[in-house]
């Protein structure tokens, strides 16, 4: 939905909201809500409590009444934040202020535009079996979700009882979802069917893990399957667009992700990256035309040997070439994610096709696991940065760095002696560019989901991501579910590269790659525009994004 279609409050309502916002819940003037950084930290805790839904008997309330009430109260919270006077605060403290502001804008955008509780059936998927490689879930989901990966298996009696008590709430939530899901967004609806079928499969995987779960799993599985049947029954009536529109996308980039690009600029960046990657790949292939083709890892023993050797080689490269400060937990963080060999005659999935040919390539993207280990072992001194930021606003930092490391480490010499591996780097860039363009055009409502998956598949080299593959469908659904996520890999890489160039020019001979990455890590997993301000002192970009605050 474009901003031109967004409902605007009447003049009377604007005056009323201003009057409400002029007082805190206790009746004190908003200006007295706080003036110090310590007050902001207290306010942040209140904000985090506020943004969570009301939970009754373990079931979150996402009803139209509850959501309307939350949105009304959000205006008061935003007014209280705006009343803070940050004059005299350190840059780091002002950065934290803008983190809170961006999070609040995220909730406001959810209410005005995204409305996952009324547009996205997949929002009600509670079961999550595996840990994401980023600080929080990649997209909006009902809270409190159930992260099965946080439990140790086999389950203790205590953990089984706790998990059962959470799973048993699923039927009531899905009953509520039938009342809440009133909007007409076809692709989100159809993607939700796939997502909820995934929950059925996840519950089947949990069955038999512990007798204490049996009753809760059976009830939740029946409820989820019935919910899928209802979604399929209603599907023919869902004919409307699912994208948020370019105007809304631009507002979201600026005010939630604090990104200095527009939808159109991101499209241009990714069109350039698609052409560059294909051209570079073909030139690499030409250079390597007389070399034998790479072959896939063929056995479990070869898998274990080569993937472990890849971690060892990569960690040595980072240390010996002074790329980043090496922490004790880094090696383990990568090694724990090696996984195990999966036999296959056909395609395994796009990223496995890359890794099974040259395991060291995707170890570079494992910077994600460094980030998560850093949060766990070296928490940031700021209370506001110690926890994962809401609404995926960490993606400009997390996805930008992890994606960038693939090509940057190649340029730094990591793939010397592995010419065929260089081809894989450009295949990765091409796939990221193609899927981002498809996702951008989903949100501009130029593409349907079918057209987006066909485009992303067609422009991914070597046929490694067929149009019917789970990878391409899952990615495009995620990018429709969570605006900017698909463009965050290369769009944010571009943003990091712009800052690297600026920082190198600013520091002159004092610039080193290690200093750059160490300083980035020291700022935490926050938007790149805020990292730029904190490290370089250049506040203009943030001030412009904040509308002069």
Image (spheres, rainbow, N blue to C red):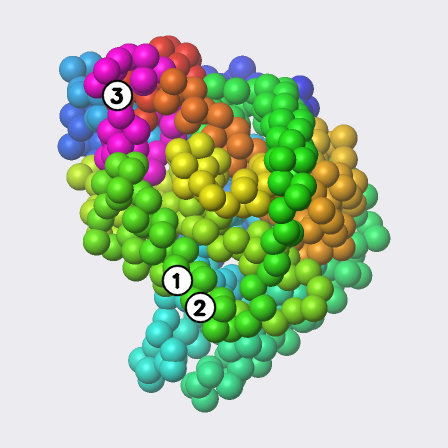
The Cα–Cα distance between marks 3 and 2, rounded to whole angstroms, is 38 Å
**Which residue position is annotated with label 1?**
308
Q: Position of residue 139 (x, y in %)?
A: 52, 46
Q: Position of residue 55 (x, y in %)?
A: 42, 58
**Residue in the image at 61% along x and 58% along y:** 295
Vertical arrangement, residue 473 with respect to residue 249, above or below: below
Residue 536 found in image quarter: top left
The one of 416 and 107 positioned closer to us in this rendering:
416
Other residues around mark 2 within 10 Å, as few (<14) / some (14–19) / many (≥20): some
Read off the magenta span.
Answer: 502-530
Asked whether the residues under the numbered discs 3 and 1 touch, taking CB atoms below 8 Å apart as contact, a structural biologist would say no
**Which residue position is annotated with label 3?**
511
**Residue in the image at 33% along x and 82% along y:** 156
**Disc number for residue 277:** none
User: Quick one: SS at disc 1?
Assistant: helix
Residue 505 lies in magenta, yes or no?
A: yes
Residue 227 found in image quarter: bottom right
**Disc number for residue 304:** 2
User: Quick one: SS at disc 3?
Assistant: loop
């Amino acid at each position: 939905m474009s901003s031109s279609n967004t409902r605007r409050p009447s003049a009377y309502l604007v005056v009323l909201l201003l009057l409400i916002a002029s007082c805190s819940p206790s009746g004190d003037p908003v200006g007295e809500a706080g003036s110090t950084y310590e007050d902001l930290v207290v306010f942040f805790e209140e904000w985090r409590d506020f943004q969570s839904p009301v939970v009754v008997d373990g079931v979150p309330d996402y009803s139209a009444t509850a959501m309307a009430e939350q949105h009304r109260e959000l205006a008061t919270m935003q007014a209280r934040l705006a009343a803070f006077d940050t004059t005299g605060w350190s840059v780091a403290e002002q950065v934290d202020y803008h983190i809170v502001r961006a999070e609040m804008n995220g909730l406001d955008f959810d209410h005005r535009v995204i409305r996952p509780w009324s547009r996205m059936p997949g929002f009600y998927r509670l079961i999550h079996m595996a840990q994401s490689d980023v600080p929080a879930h990649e997209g909006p989901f009902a809270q409190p979700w159930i992260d099965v990966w946080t439990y140790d298996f086999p389950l203790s009696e205590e953990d089984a009882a706790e998990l059962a008590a959470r799973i048993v709430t699923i039927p009531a939530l899905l009953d509520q979802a039938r009342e809440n899901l009133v909007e007409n967004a076809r692709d989100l609806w159809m993607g939700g069917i796939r997502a909820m079928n995934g929950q059925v499969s996840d519950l089947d995987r949990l069955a038999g893990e512990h007798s204490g779960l049996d009753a809760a799993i059976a009830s939740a599985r029946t409820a989820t399957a019935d919910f899928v049947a209802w979604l399929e029954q209603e599907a023919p009536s869902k004919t409307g667009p699912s994208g948020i529109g370019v105007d809304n996308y631009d507002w979201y980039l600026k005010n939630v992700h604090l990104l200095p690009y527009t939808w159109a600029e991101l499209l241009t960046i990714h069109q350039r990256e698609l052409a560059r990657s294909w051209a570079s790949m073909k030139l690499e292939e030409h250079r390597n035309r007389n070399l034998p083709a790479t072959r896939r890892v063929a056995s479990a023993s070869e898998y274990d040997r080569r993937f472990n050797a890849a971690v060892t080689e990569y960690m040595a490269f980072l240390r010996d070439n002074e790329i980043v400060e090496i922490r004790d937990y880094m090696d383990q963080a990568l090694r724990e994610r090696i996984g195990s060999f999966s036999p296959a005659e056909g395609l395994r999935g796009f990223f496995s096709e890359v890794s099974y040919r040259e395991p060291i390539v995707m170890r570079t993207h494992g910077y994600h696991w460094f980030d998560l280990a850093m949060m766990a072992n070296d928490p940031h001194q700021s209370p506001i940065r110690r926890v994962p930021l809401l609404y995926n606003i960490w993606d400009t930092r997390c996805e930008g760095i992890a994606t960038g490391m693939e090509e940057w480490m190649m340029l730094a010499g990591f793939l010397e002696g592995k010419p065929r591996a260089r081809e894989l780097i450009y295949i990765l860039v091409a796939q990221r560019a193609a899927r981002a363009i498809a996702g951008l055009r989903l949100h501009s409502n130029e593409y349907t989901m079918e057209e987006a998956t066909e485009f992303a598949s067609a422009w991914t080299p070597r046929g490694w991501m067929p149009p019917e593959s789970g990878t391409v469908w899952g990615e495009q659904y995620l990018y429709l579910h969570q605006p900017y996520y698909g463009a965050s890999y290369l769009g944010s890489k571009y943003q990091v590269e712009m800052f690297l160039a600026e920082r190198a020019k600013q520091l002159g001979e004092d610039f080193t790659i290690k200093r750059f990455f160490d300083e980035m890590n020291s700022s935490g997993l926050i938007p790149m525009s805020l990292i730029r301000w904190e490290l370089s002192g250049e506040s203009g970009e943030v001030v412009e994004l904040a509308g002069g605050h």
